[in-house]
Image (cartoon, helix red, strand yellow):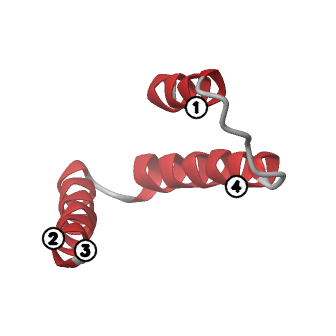
């Protein structure tokens, strides 16, 4: 969260304007984080959580590598 706030502060300091939908996106991100944390803590083992995270990171990395 600190990283996101720092990035937002830097964008504002650089004179960028924020999208009008920013509050909606921020709210959705907070709800998603809360739900993900609840599911991870209550229903998934540490091993399963690591496996799911590694899959997500693998997909994201492949998408970055294949982007033109």
Q: Is residue 53 above or below residue 46?
A: below
Q: Which numbered disc, 4 or 2, marks the residue that appears first in the sequence?
A: 4
Which type of secondary structure does the marked residue at label 4 adopt? helix
Horizontal side, residue 57 vs residue 1: left or right:
left
Residue with the mark numbered 2: 65
CB contact under 8 Å: marks 2 and 3 = yes
Q: CA distance from mark 1 to mark 4?
A: 20 Å
Q: CA distance from mark 2 to mark 1?
A: 26 Å
In percent of width and height, residue 23 lies at 80, 46
Q: CA distance from mark 4 to mark 2?
A: 28 Å
Which type of secondary structure does the marked residue at label 1 adopt? helix
Which type of secondary structure does the marked residue at label 2 adopt? helix
CB contact under 8 Å: marks 1 and 4 = no
In percent of width and height, residue 38 lies at 54, 49
Give the foreground label among 4 and 2: 2
Query: How crowded is the residue under tag 1: few (<14 C-alpha within 10 Å), some, or many (20+)?
Result: few
Q: Give the numbered dot on residue 11.
A: 1
CB contact under 8 Å: marks 3 and 4 = no
Give the foreground label among 1 and 4: 1
Query: How crowded is the residue under tag 3: few (<14 C-alpha within 10 Å), some, or many (20+)?
Result: few
Q: Identify the residue at the far front of this view.
A: 15
Query: How crowded is the residue under tag 2: few (<14 C-alpha within 10 Å), some, or many (20+)?
Result: few
Q: CA distance from mark 3 to mark 1?
A: 25 Å
Residue shown at the point (68%, 51%) measured from the top left? 31
Residue with the mark numbered 3: 63
Residue shown at the point (56%, 47%) measured from the top left? 33
Residue with the mark numbered 4: 28
Q: Which numbered disc, 3 or 4, marks the residue that appears first in the sequence?
A: 4
Give the foreground label among 3 and 4: 3
Give the foreground label among 3 and 1: 1
Asked whether 12 or 38 is in front, the reply is 12
Q: Which quarter of the rendering shows the C terminus?
A: bottom left
């Amino acid at each position: 969260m600190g990283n996101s706030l720092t990035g937002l502060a830097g964008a504002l300091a650089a004179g960028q304007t924020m999208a009008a939908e920013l509050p909606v996106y921020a709210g959705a991100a907070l709800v998603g984080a809360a739900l993900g944390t609840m599911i991870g803590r209550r229903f998934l083992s540490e091993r399963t959580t690591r496996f799911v995270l590694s899959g997500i990171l693998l997909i994201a990395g492949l998408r970055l590598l294949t982007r033109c």
